[in-house]
Structure formats: structure tokens, C-alpha cells
Image (tube, helix red, strand yellow):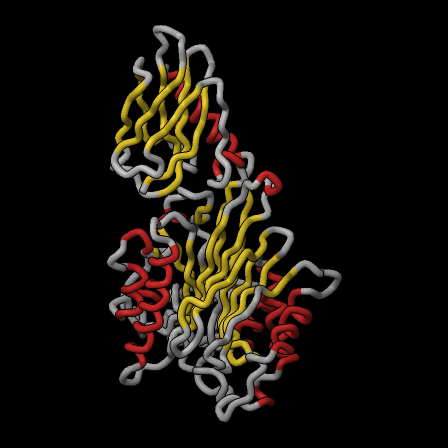
Amino acid sequence: MKKTIITIAVIVLCARASAQDTITILQYNLLNYGNVTSYCPADSNTVPDKNAWTKTIFDYIKPTIFTVNELNRQPVMHDSLLHNVMNTNGVTYYKLAPVTNTTNTYLMNALYYDSRKVECAARYVAQNYVRDATVYKMYYLSPDLQRGDTVFFFCSLVHLKAGSYEGDDEDRAVMADNLMSWIEDFDTLGEQNFMVMGDFNVYTHTEAAFQLFINHSDSLIRFYDPINQIGSWNSNPAFAAYHTQSTRGGGGSGCASTGGLDDRFDYILFNRNIKDNSHGLSYVTGSYKALGNDGNHYNKSIIADGNSSVPSAVLNALYHNSDHLPIVMKLAVDATPANLGIAAPEYQPLGVTLTPNPAQDFVNVDISDNAEGTWYTISIVAPNGRVMRCVNTQERRCSIPVAILHKGTYVMVIATGDGRHCAMKIVKR
């Protein structure tokens, strides 16, 4: 019986290894793209200049998903970014996901994506205090998409209230709480792949807004820092390698903050399903970085005293384009049909009934089989191919405990020594 289980596990794991793809995410505060304000005059922040600088950065990363903050609210500016930065030199496949601006702010968020690899299925306004928090339901364009097999994931795009004056941190907390309440209502079982990304404007991990993300009372929807660098980031040299603002030293235009790198404002966080690779999407270790931060520019401009972390043209663009550094992160997507959580394989040489399904504490397995003296190997396999539970029995009716499993979708495989088997989807509540 051990050989049967090992064979099943190896088949699942080998299929994963041969059918992985990578999604690259670029999150960037563009600093008043297309906006002219009293503190940001037109001649210090022109759209043609910003298009050229952004394109240099964009072409260097070639992201699958590009999320941005501080975009002008006019559609012409949304199109300008799309057609002058992404869809140039024969490229036509980048798309803009539907934008939202229910608060009518002049600093909007937007999500652009490579339509060869992913698509947008839906978008939701999760909260609209100060600025919209927009949640995008994305899916990977799997080769087996026509059979209903794919990975879904949600990008929650935010730009929390800026400032360190009285009440600013409370506004950030309200925005974060609204978003997390929406996620809690939407994903009640914690079964989805969720990310939250954007400019959080938090100064320390103890701020209520950040705690709502990483230490929410509902553990199923908590978010995690890919680089696990939690602390008091503001003006703290211990976090020099992770700061994202400011790219400038002293001087410069009134549009950009100055003072050098000393704050970690910009993030991409993900939930436990991505952390644990339990739903077809996983973090590529070591891929998360603040682009242009070499760890040697605490309280300095990123171009001071040499910086070889990126090519010189990219470094120059990062310096001039915005006072924020963009965040880059890669995700591995499992393109194996049986592991994508949409359509589990259902072979029926054995007649099997599972009740209840979804299950909380036990799953009752009822096998309709007339063969006498048959041993049945019953295993529960996670989406990442790991065998979570294995039972060998001659009983055609038995109960399998599942209380210790994380909530989510699994595949139950029932196999016999003579090669008969079936695989059925099971949901743990």
C-alpha cells in the first residue's frame, strides 16, 4: 500500500514541477502622474518625462501585473500610461483593468496587466473612505482554461492616508479595517489567494492599520510580509535595505519629498494560502525587493556615492520619476489542472460518496465495491501535492478526521491494490 501512496504523491508533485509559470508584480507610487498642484508645478513633473522614466523602469522589469498609486483621475491620463509606457514598439497586449474612484480623488489607483498571461474577472470597491480600495479578481490563463482549470487570485490595491499629523494614523486604520471587513465577508472560509499592495504610509508595524493586516482577529484572512521585516521602519538604519522613500537627498523639486531613504511605505503582502502554496500560487523566495535600494543609502539619495543594484539608466529613472521606489515580487503559478482547485479529476471505477462535503471534523467515506477482501488506501492531498492524511482500511464505510487541516479545497484519493481508484474534491470548513 505504501507504494501506491508514494506513486500518487510523486505523480502530483512531478506534474507541478513540469507545469509552473511565473507572474511578476510591480507596485509603484508614480508621484502625481498627470497632476498639477500648488506643491507640484507642471514644469517639475511633466507627463512626457514621467512616461520616459516609467518606461525605462517598466521595460527593465516587464511585469505581468503593474499596480500604481497617484494617477490622475482623467481617463486620458490612464490611457497615456498604457499607450506611452506599456503598449509601445509593437506591444499591444497590456490592458487596463476597470478603475474605480467613488471618492472623486485626484490621486487614483489603477491595475494594468499582460493579457497574454492573466485576465481580470471582476473588480470590487472594498472601501471608499478617503480613497477607494479596489479589489481585482484575476485569473491565470492556463492551457487548460477551456476545461475550467485555472488559478484565481485577488489584488487589493490601496493608498492609505498620508501624514504624521494627529488623526492621520486613525484614518489609515479606518481604511484598513474597512478593507479587512470586506475580505472577511467575501472570503468567509479563507479559501482564496489574496494580496494587498500599495502605499500604506505607515511608520511602524505597531500602527493600527498595519496590525489589522498582519494580526487580524480572523486568522484566516491575515496577511504576511514576504521578507518578514516587521518593525519600526521610520528613520531606523536596521531597515536600510527595505526603505522605499525618499529617493531624493536634499533639494530637488517641491513635488518630491526629500531626505533620503528612511521610510518603508510601499508593500505587497499576501495571505496564508500564497504563503503555504495551498491554492496553486506561491511566493518565489528572494524575489521581493525595493527596486534600486542596495542597502547602502540610508538617509541618502539613491544616486549618491554609487549604486549598482540596477543599471544606471534605471537608477536615474527611479531617482527622477518619483520619491518612492517600486516593489517587485514574483509568484509561481501551478498550471497543473488537478491542482488548480476548479475541477478535480473524478475517475469512477469505484463508486464513492463523501459526506458531509464541505466537512468540518470528519468526512464519511462510503465505497460501493463488491470485491471481497480489498484494502483501500484513502489519502487527502493538498493542492501543492502534499499528502496530508493517509488511511489503509478494508472497511467500505469509514470516517476520516479532518479537523486539523487548514480550511480550503483538497483532493481525496481512494486507491486499491489492483489499480482501481477515484479522486474527488473535498472542502474543509
Of the pair 345 and 389, the residue shown nearer to us: 345
- Is 2 located above or below residue 337 in the figure? above
Query: Which image quarter is the C terminus in?
Result: top left
**Residue at image x 39%, y 57%?**
186
Toward the viewer: 304 or 43?
A: 43
Q: Is residue 395 visible?
A: yes
Query: Which residue occupies the foreground of this view, 307 or 231?
Result: 231
Task: Decide if residue 293 is in sight here.
Answer: no
108 displayed left or right of 77: left
Q: Is residue 410 left or right of residue 18?
A: left
Q: Residue furthest right?
A: 90
Q: Tell me where residue 58 sits by quadrant.
A: bottom right
Residue 373's spot in the image, x, y percent?
A: 34, 6
Q: Residue furthest top?
A: 372
**In the displayed structure, would residue 141 be above or below residue 88?**
above
- Image point (54%, 65%), residue name: 111
Q: Position of residue 121 (x, y in %)?
A: 55, 56
For the point 41% across and 66% down, the residue is 126
Quadrant, the N terminus? top left
- Residue 410 against residue 353 in the figure, above or below: below
209 displayed left or right of 104: left
